Every structure is written in C-alpha cells, then in structure tokens.
Amino acid sequence: MSLEDYGEVVDGVNYLTVGDLKFINYFVIQRYTPEEPISILKPNELASLQARPAMHRYYNQTDDIFELASVLIESIVLNHCFANGNKRTAFVAGYIFLLLNGYELTAPSEDVIEMMVGVAEKTFDAADLERWLAYWSRDFDARILCTPVEEFPLDFIKDLNANRA
C-alpha cells in the first residue's frame, strides 16, 4: 500500500487545539518529570495563544509555516499558561504543528534546549526562532501519521530509532 491509501494532502494550515496543547503538557510532564504538578494557570490565555497562529496568518496574510510555528512556540513559552513544562510543551507543540503541516524538525537536543531557553529569556525572538525552525526542518509527508505502525516504511522506522539514540 502507498501513502495515498491512508490520507490525502489537505490545502491550508492544520492547527493544534486547546485540547491538544493540554495533552502535550500532560504528556511531557508525565514522560520527563512525573513528580511535577500538572495544572493550567491561565485557561483564557491558553485559548488565546492557541488561536494566535491562525490570527497571525489572517492579519499578516502569510502561509509561512515556520513563521506560524514560531508564533505558537513563542506564545506558549512567554505566556506561561501551564504550572510546569511550558518550554517542553512549546517545543513539542511546535514539532507536531510542523509535522502536521509537512515538515519535520531535526535539530539536535542541545540546540533545542538553547533555543527554548533563549526564547524564555528573550535573547531569541520570533524571527530568530522562525529562521532556526526553517534551518532545522525537512519535508515530511504527514500522511504517514495515518499509516498503521506495522505498515510504516522501514526507512522511517530506522530514522525514528536513530533520532532516539
């Protein structure tokens, strides 16, 4: 079977929902620091920052996925809506946003940490983040996310496992 059998390419931008962002925050805390409390400090701001990429797209008339991802990531980091894991949540949300929109972020872990801390400390702004995302991203066919795991192409599984090492 080919990827065409599992999904279709959709025009436009795929956005994360507030529920997606809550789940990502829950996931990163459970995965890396399960002793930390999980809560939302600013639910209204969470809803606002979730909509920010769509609003930015509309008002700036842009379809630049890296620009939209940088807006999402920066918003999560700087608004600090979650009690814990804001930088991790921002990175994973940005990573998933890029995947859903046809790009895979391939930056090394050390660079990810440096960028997320830099955004939090405001030594990097959205434009810096946008350039960084574009530099470290490669094309990705999101239809693979619809493929049953047992039918994943072997090269994708090898790449995935190599990135985990």
Image: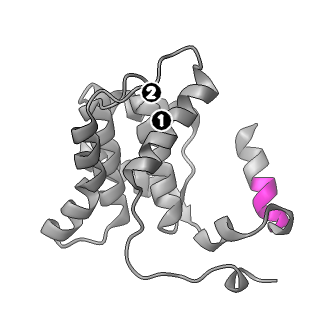
Question: In the drawing, what numbered circle is on residue 25?
Answer: 1
Question: Split into 4 quadrants, where in the image is the N terminus?
Answer: bottom right
Which type of secondary structure does the marked residue at label 1 adopt? helix
> Does residue 41 lie above or below 111 as drawn?
above
Let me know if residue 141 appears in the view: no
Q: Earlier in the sequence, mark 1 or mark 2?
A: 1
Question: Split into 4 quadrants, where in the image is the C terminus?
Answer: top right
Question: In the drawing, what numbered circle is on residue 80?
Answer: none
- Relative side of 10 to 131, left or right: right
- Relative side of 73 to 152, left or right: left
Q: Amino acid at mark 2?
A: Gly
**Residue sitting at 32 percent across and 67 percent down?**
64
> Does residue 142 lie above or below 20 as drawn?
below
**Residue sitting at 29 percent across and 29 percent down?**
80
Image spot of residue 96 (x, y percent): 51, 54
- Relative side of 153 to 27, left or right: right
Residue contact at pointers 1 and 2, CB within 8 angstroms: yes
Residue at the disc numbered 2: 85
In the image, the segment drawn in magenta is 153-159
Which type of secondary structure does the marked residue at label 2 adopt? loop
